[in-house]
Image: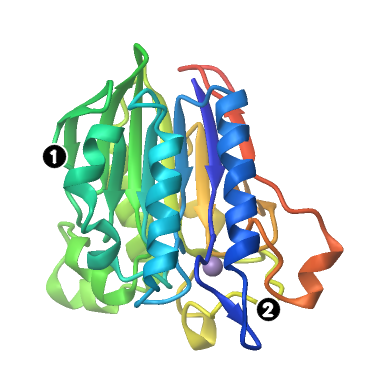
Amino acid sequence: MKLIHTADWHLGKNIEGHSRLEEQRLFLKDFINICEEEQADIIIIAGDIYDNYNPSAMAEQLFYDTLKQLSRNGDCMTVVIAGNHDNPERLVASGPLARDHGIVMAGTPNSVITPGMYGKNEITESDAGYIHAIIHGEEADILLVPFPSEKRLNEVYLDETEEETKKAASYSEKMSSLFGSLATHFHEDSIHLIASHLFVMKSVEDGSERSIQLGGSYMVGGEIFPENADYIALGHVHKPQKVPGCPKARYSGSPLPFNVRETSFDKQVIAVTLTAGSPC
Ligand SMILES: [Mn+2]
């Protein structure tokens, strides 16, 4: 299975009053070509599709037009999760229409995707934060954890511990417990994927990210991710990098520089070849 991972498009972003929409349009044209050339089976867009909660009609139109072309008439599955910049309800509002094009949209960690056909591929099983998909005959378990704010995380944080202990648990402990319970869905003979939008400690920011929360209480360690994940597609940090302490987790980075510091390194999208039971 060929996966293409991207994130942090920030469609509709202005810098000092200058619109970046034309540059974003050029990137997306490139991106559509890359996905076509690679014959991607699945595309993950790991959050921050838009730059703010109320994107312009032009930004929305650019997004929908791109999704339609990425779909290759429903042949490719595209998975979209919300980042901290996105309005989760608004982002997924087009979900029912997008489904015929193989597009799967998750706004919050407790989103449950309806099983069934998504374009030419199928979701056979689902739960909050989890789908099992059959894509071109290959099976994949995909954990979807859109930007988990403290409030949204508390809505899905369930375990056997007492109420008091639960309250005292740190953000990182809750995230670790969430991924632990989601990973129980992993089937042995399937590809194991994770898509999330969060900040992992020791990752290098370069200033154009809006802090997920001041004081760093939303930071998690690389060890919170399940060890048997094959690939972890992350969004939030705009510089492409492997996640310290978790080599299977990567930030694709944003496709365009959003501040001067970001002009010193190359931007990228990531292509990953996956086979169940062997390293990607
Ligand atoms: Mn971002």
Residue drawn at x 52%, y 87% is 215
User: Is ligand 1 less than 8 Å from the beta carbon at label 2?
Assistant: no
Q: Nearer the viewer, residue 48 or 13?
A: 13
Residue 107 position, x and y percent, is: 28, 59
Residue drawn at x 33%, y 30% is 141
Which disc, if any, is residue 114?
A: 1
Please indicate, yes or no, whether residue 82 appears anywhere in the rendered image.
Answer: yes
Please indicate, yes or no, whether residue 251 appears anywhere in the rendered image.
Answer: no
Residue drawn at x 43%, y 66% is 58
| Secondary structure of the residue carrying numbered label 1 | loop
Residue projecting furthest to the right: 264
User: Which picture quadrant has residue 111?
Assistant: bottom left
Q: Nearer the viewer, residue 17 or 141?
A: 17
In the displayed structure, does residue 25 sit left or right of residue 106?
right
Residue drawn at x 69%, y 52% is 241
In the displayed structure, does residue 39 sit left or right of residue 224?
right
| Secondary structure of the residue carrying numbered label 2 | loop
